[in-house]
Image: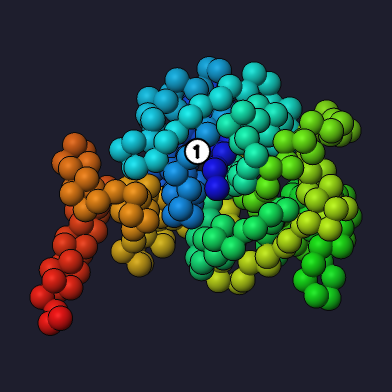
Amino acid sequence: MKGILLAGGSGSRLYPLSLVANKQLQPVYDKPMVYYPLTVLIAGGIREICLIAAPEDLPRFQQLLGDGSQWGIHLEYRLQARPEGIAQTFLIAADFIGDGPVTLILGDNLFFGGDALPRALAAFQGGASIFAYHVTNPSSYGVVELDASGQARSLEEKPASPRSPFAVPGVYLYDGQVVEIARSLKPSSRGELEVTDVNREYLRRGQLQVTRLSRGFAWLDAGTSTSLFDAAAFVQTIEKRQGIKLGCPEEAALRRGFLSLEQFENLIQKMPDCEYRHYLQGIGTDFRRAESAQMSMPA
């Protein structure tokens, strides 16, 4: 499974903050926004990742993330000359995707709680898999209508009168058909290639799976000034109360086995003296302790 992180768009909903930096480079509490979806991909076991951004923003992402080798992954970059819809992603990254499968995650989406995403990645065998999340304002999102068995009945993009309270969060799993489907799309009335139309085609083919996310799962779209503040407050609350960090690619890479403990500790040594380094040092100490305990157990 490969991963695509879409970090493009004009950021108009964040104006005038977007005059300072790309939306996905804005801080969400103590980390750049892009760290959160990147961590989701790493935690899901994805090592080959392509980040898509506008030409003026790409150098800053490359400076921030590099080639990904510090986390045991491989990062590639593609240009999005003009934002023309989420489904444009599959045309821009067609050579990266190849025959699939691929997970697309939006750079302004944050996820927390449960193991629904990793399980879906591990269980994926073909077709398309999307998620359904209960929201109070479904007209702001792509909406999926579910039948009594929990399968998709219809899909709409930002409908004025939604048929369902279930929004489709910004993470999607597809097989290699997605490039061919994207090439067949026509722009919507908004002038965009809609990811909802991609999902509709998989539904028409009888190849769309939907996973309903539980109440214990949190999804935040940090694309507006208000939602960006809400996301930062949420992250701060979770981190302070639980003593964990969200959106930490180093920790995800260690737990996934992409980094050895020695590589992890060497990576920390290069960081300045800060809260982020102190947290990771604690993670390293916990791993060392667990390693020692395992070695001391009788055979």
Amino acid found under the numbered disc labelled 1:
Ile
- Relative to 194, does residue 243 appear above or below in the rendering? below
Residue lying furthest bottom in this view?
A: 298
Q: Which residue appears at 79% of the width and 44% of the height?
A: 198
Viewer-proximal residue, 274 or 51? 51
Residue at the spot of label 1: 49
Task: State how the image is colored.
Answer: rainbow
Q: Which residue appears at 85% of the width and 53% of the height?
A: 205
Viewer-proximal residue, 100 or 287? 100
Tell me if residue 267 can be seen.
yes
Q: Which residue appears at 23% of the width and 48% of the height?
A: 264
Q: Is residue 263 left or right of residue 176?
A: left
Q: Assess disc 1: are there few (<14), some (14-19) or many (≥20) residues with their C-alpha within 10 Å of its C-alpha.
A: many
- Relative to 64, does residue 141 appear above or below in the rendering? below
Looking at the figure, which quarter contains the C terminus?
A: bottom left
* Residue 229 location (% of width, % of height): 51, 47
Q: Is residue 221 left or right of residue 150?
A: left
* Residue 68 location (% of width, % of height): 38, 35
* Residue 22 location (% of width, % of height): 52, 28
Q: Is residue 296 left or right of residue 87?
A: left
Q: Is residue 58 left or right of residue 248?
A: right
Residue 78 is drawn in which quadrant?
top right
- Count the numbered circles shown: 1
Q: Which residue appears at 18% of the width and 73% of the height?
A: 294
Viewer-proximal residue, 132 or 75? 75
- Relative to 206, does residue 141 appear above or below in the rendering? above
Residue 95 is drawn in which quadrant?
top right
Tell me if residue 27 can be seen.
no
* Residue 63 location (% of width, % of height): 38, 25
